[in-house]
Image (cartoon, rainbow, N blue to C red):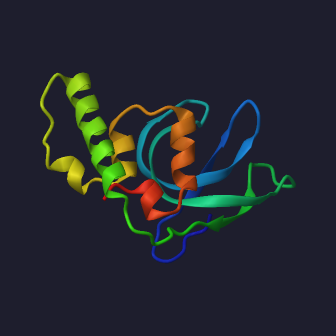
Amino acid sequence: MAAEGGREREFGIVWLSEQELKPIGCACEIDQVIGRMDDGRLNLLVRGTRPFRLLERQDDLPYPAGTIEFLEDRETEPDAEAGRIAREAYTALVAEATDAAPDTERPVAMTAYEMAGDVRVGLRAKQGMPARRSEKASRIP
């Protein structure tokens, strides 16, 4: 992905499961180079920037590439009950994992993406998050 709109260089990550190449991926930017190996490979810390849909693979290049479209969120009313349940589950999970009472105000302002980034979530659940483009499906009120 070339630089655009004031962004530094981005690249895309798409999950290749045992069954298929998933159609929804995430654009990323390099946050930190953690290490360089003698053979030229890098260990990177990256940050997801925005989701995209893979429209077409470009197999004629010497590296994985494709044509994409960036996905926009759909404006919908948040589901207050689903938000309450998600915040309670997140708070209970943090308490269980850390043996400490979490800050009860923090989850109120967090999105579903931020909550998922704080805890270990399975690959299938993580893959489903960028595909949900409505506020009701992906954001905690």
Q: Nearer the viewer, residue 51 or 106?
A: 106
Return the x and y of residue 136 as percentages of the image width and height.
43, 60
Q: Which residue lies furthest to the front in this view?
A: 81
Return the x and y of residue 22 as percentages of the image width and height.
69, 45
Q: Which residue lies furthest to the bottom in this view?
A: 5
Q: Which of 64 and 141 is in front in this view?
A: 141
Q: Which residue is drawn at 82% across and 54% down?
A: 61
Q: Which residue is drawn at 47% across and 55% down?
A: 137
Q: Which residue is drawn at 23% across and 36% down?
A: 91
Check the picture and name the quadrant holding the N terminus: bottom right
Check the picture and name the quadrant holding the C terminus: bottom left
Q: Nearer the viewer, residue 86 or 34?
A: 86
Asked if residue 97 lies left or right of residue 125, the reply is left
Return the x and y of residue 79 as percentages of the image width and height.
37, 58
Q: Is residue 79 above or below residue 96?
A: below
Q: Residue at x 85, y 52 (%)?
A: 59
Asked if residue 95 lies left or right of residue 25, the reply is left
Asked if residue 53 lies left or right of residue 136, the reply is right
